[in-house]
Image: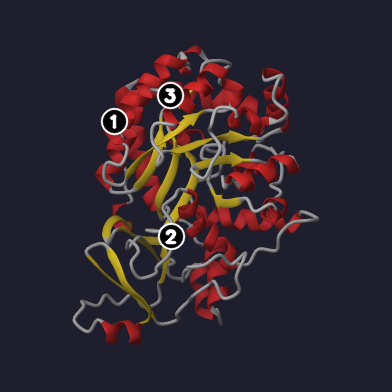
Amino acid sequence: MHTPRDPFREEGAFEAFDDGAVAHENGRILASGSFAQVRRDHPGGDVRDESGALLLPGLVDTHVHYPQLAVVGAMGLELLEWLERRAFPEEARLADPAHARFVAREFVNGLAAAGTTTALVFGSHFPEAQDALFAEADRVGLRITSGLVVSDRNLPPALRLEPDAAYQAARRLVERWHNRGRLRYAVTPRFSLSCSEGMLEACGALRAEADDMAVTTHINESAAEVRTVAELFGWSKDYLATYERFGLVGPASVLAHDVHVSDDELRRLGAADASVAHCPASNAFLGSGAFPMRRHLEHGVRLALGTDVGGGTGLSLLKEGLIAYQVQRLLPDGCLLRPEHLLYLATRAGAEALGLGAGVGDLSAGKSADYVLVRPPPGGTLDVVLRHADSPEQALGAVFTLAREESVVEVRVAGEPVYTRADARVPRG
């Protein structure tokens, strides 16, 4: 099952084959379709029979925080209080390089175990911890775009850098890691609430040095955050303007959340061809609000899914798709999402947001052989539902509703295994 086209714009964008196959060689997909046709076209290939499983493209997470995995599940707090009491203290622990290396192993393993092959990762405030993430992702083989998180105000002192020091530290990381293997660098101001104009200017200067460098940050997540940003930037007409002035909004930009957004901001986001990372679990868990998906689509703003761990409730994009579906069902002007919409948002849409759509995001011939094999535990609810499913759409809906890490049995990037269920154990200590 895959969505080689956008189901929000085209009918028939979802392709599924009950008895399907993907042929790949040297990391690239040669063909996908019915088993009979693929076998006829590639008679000499070795065949793996995975009957009863589902094959999906590798999942793409467009917003997830590497230092925050341990604070998932901190209930009863709104965004700014949650940051102060849970997120910031946990992120400060990554000043210890040994701890950062261990967290990087846990985090990268967790992404792979959830079926995520590509991710835009909000990194650490500490250069050595950011090195640890890139090194672990490189070792495992995931496609990771990430960068040093920079802030110079309204955060604990341990998480601040002056703009020039932040620029220099980020520049060294770019030289070491940008376009190394499957890794890319992302300019990452935390959010305007924690960045002075000088810091945003430094971020814009770094971004201007490379056309293929991503930008990621937060925008319009909670009402209190929006009010505070307006007070800090008295000259700005809205939150988006604080990024626009410094050249941080364009086709390579992925802005997370965008819950409390004006129509004028949506118009400008669409015109800039920027993307929004929709994080429904986090928006609900922290009480930030319900995402206005229909308004984004009407303004032509590109969307994809993000888990937003640790404000989010886990690393599974399948779970994220279910919550997106449920929240939209409750809104008076919500979108009625079908299973193919969720698959698109979790795969191809994310790849396009990251500028990787030419190479990953679906199972079309010529793309990288990034895929996830889903096989439910025998006798569980998902197993029962799939055995009774009478259409691919029904089966896919069941996967988003019921499948989580326990159903992900194999994950490959460029045809190379990066995770199998037998490798689920993470070193302790």
Q: Using the image, determine if residue 142 lies above or below residue 86.
A: below
In the drawing, does residue 118 fall left or right of residue 217?
left
Q: Type of residue at label 1?
A: Glu
Counting residues from the start of the chain, the first of labels 3 and 1 encountered is: 3
In the drawing, does residue 78 fall left or right of residue 26?
right
Mark 1: few, some, or many residues within 10 Å (few <14, many ≥20)?
Answer: few
Nearest-to-viewer mark from 2 and 1: 1
Mark 2: few, some, or many residues within 10 Å (few <14, many ≥20)?
Answer: many
Q: Secondary structure at mark 1?
A: helix
Q: Position of residue 44 (x, y in %)?
A: 18, 81
For label 3, the residue is 125
Q: Position of residue 7 (x, y in %)?
A: 59, 67
Q: Type of residue at label 3?
A: His
Mark drawn on residue 175: 1
Counting residues from the start of the chain, the first of labels 2 and 3 encountered is: 3
Residue at 48% x, 59% y: name it: 348
Residue 196 visible? The answer is: no
